[in-house]
């Protein structure tokens, strides 16, 4: 820092010498006395390894203010994993069903679901519909971003809340009416 | 005059006063204390750093993998094409009731690929090779086996049963 300043002052003086503004160079010069010692490469590695432990580490997510930009993004992944995870589990169960004596053919499932009370049906439908509609609708945003569309902070916030609104609407419609 | 003004308008300890004062009058607060003032909350780290090992010499550049479109741009475009292809196949059953067997099978195939890619990126994100190499390998192989099993299961479902869109429609209206 100090050496840079001295260099700049020198340049200024060279460009426009003015004796009225002349400052003694000693005023700006700092002297730092530092002792150096040479270490071998093994010791050097040890010092470096110790120094690297001092580097900052990302703090926990809870320090960030919840905003639609990043919460929607995490919810996108969570819903995706939930939907695909259910599909995988159903696939495994469907393959294992004959061996284990389960009945996972469509008619048996329909009969099983038909016997549930209405409240349970609604709860189950909402549990499936909410992640499905969120992930599907949010997918449009991600594909738009991949084309470079709607990438300003304002638009990202607007489309984020639009997706939340549409998710709630479609989930309610298909849970209660559809 | 400046110091009088600063004293009258702001508290002596405020940052404004500090910056208005000449440097030799500024209070000598140790730097660590000044930084610590910002850290009012408990120190919570997702992953504390591992013991550091230095590979090679101290000043080696970060290894950059050789550019390979199959793992880069082609893969990226492929993911997006699969995702975009899912859009009409997802909307169609809502409009038409269910899909015919061929379209339904295409939907299944795209869902398998889309799910596989999704899980793969989760594994890449949460199981770093540097930290947990074994868990990463196990997770990737579990995913590969799981995806193949799902493929077999969906083939069986498509050929022996009514197809997923028809099945969901029937269960939904049960």
Image (spheres, coloured by chain):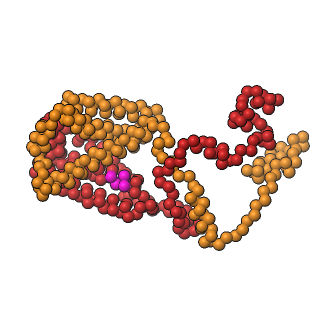
- The N terminus of chain B: image quadrant: top right
Q: Is residue A3 above or below residue B52?
A: above
Depicted B60 relative to depicted B6: above or below: below
> Residue B29's image quarter?
top right
How far across and how far down the image is residue B106, in percent? 20, 48
The residue sitting at 44% across, 61% down in the picture is B131
Query: Residue B121: within the magenta?
Result: yes
Give x and y (percent) for residue A67.
Answer: 45, 36
Residue A176 in which image quadrant? top left
- Foreground residue among A11 and A155: A155
Label the red chain with its letter.
B
Query: Bounds of the magenta span?
Result: B119-123
- Residue toward you, A42 or B10: B10
Which residue is drawn at the image coordinates 54% and 42% (left, top)?
B41
Give the quadrant of the C terminus of chain B: top left
Can residue A125 be spotted in the picture? no
Per the picture, the main secondary structure of the magenta-coloured stretch is: helix
Residue positioned 50% across, 55% down in the render = B48
Q: Is residue B41 magenta?
A: no
Question: Is residue B56 visible in this depiction of the protein?
Answer: yes
Looking at the image, the residue that sits furthest to the right is A19
Q: Position of residue A137 (x, y in %)?
A: 32, 37
Q: Colour of chain A?
A: orange
């Amino acid at each position: 820092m100090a050496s840079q300043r001295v260099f700049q002052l020198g340049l200024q003086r060279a460009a426009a010498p003015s004796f009225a503004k002349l400052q003694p160079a000693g005023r700006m010069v700092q002297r730092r006395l530092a002792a150096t010692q040479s270490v071998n490469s093994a010791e050097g590695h040890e010092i470096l390894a110790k120094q690297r432990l001092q580097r900052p580490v990302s703090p926990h997510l809870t320090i960030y203010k919840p905003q639609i930009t990043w919460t929607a993004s995490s919810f996108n992944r969570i819903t995706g994993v939930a939907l695909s995870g259910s599909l995988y589990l159903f696939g495994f169960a469907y393959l294992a069903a004959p061996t284990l004596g389960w009945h996972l053919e469509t008619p048996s499932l329909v009969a099983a679901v038909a016997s549930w009370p209405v409240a349970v049906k609604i709860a189950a439908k909402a549990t499936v519909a909410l992640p499905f509609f969120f992930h599907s609708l949010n997918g449009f945003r991600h594909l738009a971003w991949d084309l470079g569309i709607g990438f300003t902070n304002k638009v990202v916030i607007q489309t984020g809340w639009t997706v939340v609104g549409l998710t709630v609407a479609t989930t309610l419609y298909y849970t209660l009416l559809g | 005059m400046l110091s009088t003004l600063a004293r009258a308008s702001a508290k002596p300890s405020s940052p404004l006063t500090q910056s208005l004062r000449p440097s030799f009058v500024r209070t000598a607060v140790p730097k660590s204390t000044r930084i610590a003032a910002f850290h009012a909350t408990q120190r919570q780290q997702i992953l504390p750093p591992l013991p550091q090992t230095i590979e090679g010499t101290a000043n080696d550049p970060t290894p950059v993998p050789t550019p390979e479109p199959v793992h880069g741009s082609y893969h990226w475009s492929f993911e997006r094409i699969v995702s975009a292809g899912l859009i009409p196949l997802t909307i169609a059953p809502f409009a038409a009731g269910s899909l015919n067997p061929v379209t339904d099978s295409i939907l299944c195939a795209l869902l398998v690929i889309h799910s596989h890619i999704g899980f793969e990126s989760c594994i890449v994100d949460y199981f770093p090779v540097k930290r947990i190499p074994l868990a990463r390998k196990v997770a990737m192989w579990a995913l590969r086996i799981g995806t193949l099993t799902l493929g077999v299961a969906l083939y069986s479902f498509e050929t022996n049963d009514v197809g997923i869109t028809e099945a969901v429609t029937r269960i939904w209206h049960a």
